[in-house]
């Protein structure tokens, strides 16, 4: 999704109203309860919260020029990988086997067999249509942020096709966008 | 109330920008290696081993190189060739890869301009320390002279360098040779389009 993303794809940046800011904050706190105590620092009420609208209905939540979260249309907010690396405990996790790593890093969606093989792992409670951190066999840190197309149970039983959409991965355009001026 | 999480510090590779553990999947892995050996040896023990082997091989080449002909024939041809064996040219000369480290052994100052965000740029100065110059003091002098931000930072190979905000390529040579008499103009080089060019050429 962010394969070729760059700051040039931002079609508009707006400082949002206080009410919208509260809503975004509430959505993030609901999705990632462990982050709640940090949101005062991360999304300070006093500094302006910018929502950058990008192509393909992507919105970036930007504070002090740093992209922290993104979502698609009105979908759930997901942290950027850099933020997730700092707080790895906030998301549910799937793990791909070692063989899948290079495909994920090339932007490919995550196929079920890469998650169900010996090197893979699934958090069985994850339903369809939810954000999930993509970890990798033998690695400590996440390499992508995914959005499930099937529930973990279905991924296991169907074990065919795309299980998780690859939303954001190491070295994609969003990863390279450290600052949005 | 939930416990406030502490941020995890992740070791990112300055070459490919990914967490160091993913460098092996980077198309730039070759370039990451020297940084990894110094900064993440526990993640890539095989790289450290390789580097040590190579160093040992080089040493062997230097000490026993002359007797090589005599030693040959003792079944050495049946030994499996090591993958990263030093390449030998037809004349028997050793083809040595020139690395950044090698370049840095001879004292010289390398100046490079990096353009960021189309207009903003940074001039990087490497090697002043090879002339016994304290980088922290040099950085202060540079900042003052060019009225801009100058700082000492760790470069990709863990050697310290000075970054000066802005393009100071035009005046830098004169300033260096005037300020530090120990640095001859002939030891100053520019990196232009990836090529090293002598400043007094
Ligand atoms: Zn790297």
Image (cartoon, coloured by chain):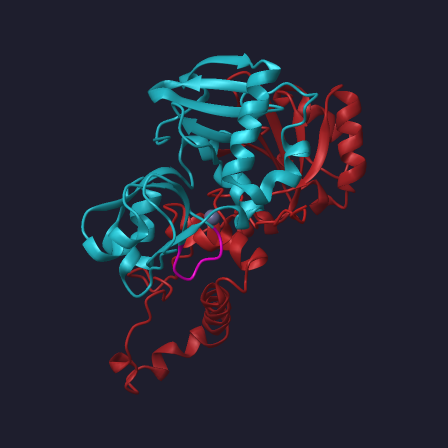
Quadrant showing the C terminus of chain B: top right
Q: Residue B112 occupies which quadrant of the picture? A: top right
Residue B194 visible in this rendered orientation of the protein: no
Furthest residue toward front? B1
Residue A35 magenta: no
Camera-side residue of A8 and A157: A157
Residue B122: x and y in percent read 61, 26
**A103 horizontally vs B28: left or right:** left
Q: Is residue A179 above or below residue B21?
A: above
Residue A140 visible in this rendered orientation of the protein: yes
Camera-side residue of B18 and A81: A81
Q: Is residue B17 above or below residue A17?
A: below
**A32 horizontally vs B177: left or right:** left
Q: Is residue B85 above or below residue A132?
A: below
Q: Residue A34 occupies which quadrant of the picture? A: top right
Q: Main secondary structure of the magenta part?
A: loop
Residue at image position (53%, 49%) is A88
Of all chains in the rendering, the one displayed in red is: B
Chain A visual colour: cyan
Residue at image position (30%, 48%) is A151
Question: What is the span of residues highlighted in magenta in the rendered image?
Answer: A136-141
Residue B54: x and y in percent read 46, 67
């Amino acid at each position: 999704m962010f394969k070729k993303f760059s700051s040039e794809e931002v079609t508009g940046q707006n400082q949002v109203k206080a009410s919208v800011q509260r809503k975004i904050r509430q959505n993030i706190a609901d999705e990632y309860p462990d982050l709640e105590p940090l949101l005062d620092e991360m999304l300070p009420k006093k500094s302006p919260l910018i929502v950058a609208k990008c192509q393909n209905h992507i919105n970036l939540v930007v504070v002090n020029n740093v992209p922290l979260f993104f979502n698609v249309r009105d979908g759930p907010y997901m942290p950027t990988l850099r933020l997730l690396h700092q707080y790895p405990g906030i998301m549910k996790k799937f793990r791909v086997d070692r063989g899948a790593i290079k495909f994920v890093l090339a932007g490919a969606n995550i196929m079920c067999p890469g998650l169900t093989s010996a090197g893979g792992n699934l958090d069985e409670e994850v339903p369809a249509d939810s954000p999930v951190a993509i970890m990798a066999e033998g690695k400590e840190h996440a390499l992508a942020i995914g959005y499930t197309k099937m529930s973990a149970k279905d991924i296991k039983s169907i074990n065919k096709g795309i299980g998780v959409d690859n939303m954001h991965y190491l070295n994609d355009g969003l990863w390279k966008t450290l600052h949005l001026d | 109330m939930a416990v406030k999480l502490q941020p995890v510090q992740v070791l990112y590779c300055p070459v490919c920008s990914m967490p160091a553990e993913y460098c092996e999947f980077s198309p730039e892995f070759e370039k990451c290696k020297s940084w990894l050996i110094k900064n993440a040896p526990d993640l890539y023990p095989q790289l450290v081993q390789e580097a040590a082997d190579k160093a040992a091989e080089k040493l062997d080449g230097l000490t026993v190189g002359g007797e090589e002909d005599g030693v040959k024939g003792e079944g050495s041809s049946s030994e499996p060739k090591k993958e990263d064996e030093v390449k030998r040219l037809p004349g028997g000369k050793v083809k040595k890869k020139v690395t950044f480290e090698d370049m840095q052994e001879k004292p010289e100052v390398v100046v490079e301009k990096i353009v960021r965000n189309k207009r903003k740029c940074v001039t990087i100065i490497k090697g002043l320390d090879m002339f016994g110059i304290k980088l922290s003091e040099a950085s202060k002098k540079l900042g003052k002279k060019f009225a801009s931000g100058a700082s000492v930072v760790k470069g990709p190979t863990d050697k310290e360098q000075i970054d000066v905000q802005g393009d100071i390529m035009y005046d830098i040579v004169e300033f260096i040779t005037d300020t530090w008499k120990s640095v001859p103009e002939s030891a100053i080089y520019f990196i232009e389009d990836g090529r090293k060019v002598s400043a007094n050429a």
